[in-house]
């Protein structure tokens, strides 16, 4: 089974069964000690794009919103069996032309990485994808808050929902996560690794 290590804020690391390492929105916390095979950046705000925190293996694939939206469309990538699909993201401070989320497929697991977003039309299509995990933001500043994030979790229909990007300027806020009324929620603290 792949593993998820939550670093805090909107940053986390996914490790595949065969040991390949994917960093999503590197910025916060620790846990950058494993050399990266893939680095994903949802947008160019400074709290999501600290690529230099990650030691890169030779041939490391870095995919940012620029590559994800090249040609004016949401692109897909395949890195030796790890499928990466860019999907819609937008909020009060983020144009959908400058930010994305990702759906990752690896080791028979599908993970939606929302990045910074509010509800999008494309989320209505996600239930048919039978996602295993949805990792959703919920700070309520420019992104969706807890109520909207819970609605999105219901619409998306993933088997498990994880809240990140909970409190600006903090790695996490457990009290807010506990108030999140999403179905099938998992509370994952920073510096915690779980099996997916």
Image: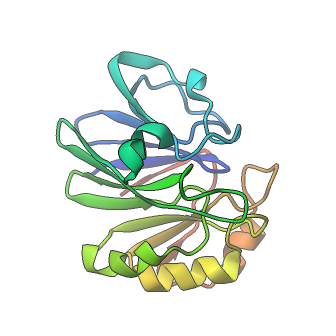
- Label tally: 0
**Residue nearest the viewer, comparing 1 with 99:** 99
Q: Position of residue 131 (x, y in %)?
A: 32, 70
Horizontally, residue 130 falls left or right of residue 10, namely: left
Model colouring: rainbow
Above or below 151: residue 149: above
Residue 182 visible in the shown view: no
**Residue nearest the viewer, comparing 122 with 174:** 122
Residue with the most extreme front position = 71
Q: Which residue is pictured at 67% across the width and 50% down the height?
A: 9
Above or below 66: residue 180: below
Q: Which residue is pictured at 51% across the width and 73% down the height?
A: 120
Horizontally, residue 109 falls left or right of residue 34, namely: left
Q: Position of residue 177 (x, y in %)?
A: 68, 71
Q: Which residue is pictured at 71% across the width and 37% down the height?
A: 46
**Residue nearest the viewer, comparing 23 with 101:** 101
Residue with the most extreme right position = 169
Horizontally, residue 33 falls left or right of residue 59, namely: right
Q: Position of residue 73 (x, y in %)?
A: 37, 53
Q: Which residue is pictured at 56% across the width and 27% down the height?
A: 51
Position of the C terminus, as image quadrant, is bottom left
Q: Position of residue 133 (x, y in %)?
A: 40, 66
Residue 108 visible in the shown view: yes
Above or below 139: residue 49: above
């Amino acid at each position: 089974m792949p593993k998820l290590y939550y670093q805090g804020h909107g940053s986390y690391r996914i490790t595949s069964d065969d040991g390949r390492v994917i960093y999503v929105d590197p910025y916060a916390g620790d846990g950058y000690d494993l050399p990266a095979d893939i680095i994903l950046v949802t947008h160019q705000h400074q709290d999501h794009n600290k690529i230099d925190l990650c030691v890169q293996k030779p041939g490391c694939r870095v995919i940012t919103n620029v590559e994800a939206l090249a040609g004016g469309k949401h692109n897909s990538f395949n890195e030796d069996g790890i499928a990466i699909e860019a999907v819609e993201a937008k909020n009060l401070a983020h144009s959908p032309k400058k930010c994305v989320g990702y759906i990752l497929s690896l080791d028979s697991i599908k993970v939606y990485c929302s990045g910074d977003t509010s509800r999008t039309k494309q989320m209505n299509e996600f239930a048919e994808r039978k996602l295993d995990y949805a990792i959703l933001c919920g700070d309520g500043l420019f992104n969706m808050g807890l109520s909207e994030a819970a609605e999105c979790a219901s619409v998306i229909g993933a088997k498990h929902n994880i809240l990140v990007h909970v409190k600006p300027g903090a790695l996490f806020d457990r009290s807010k996560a506990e108030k999140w009324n999403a179905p099938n929620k998992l509370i994952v603290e920073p510096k915690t690794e779980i099996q997916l």
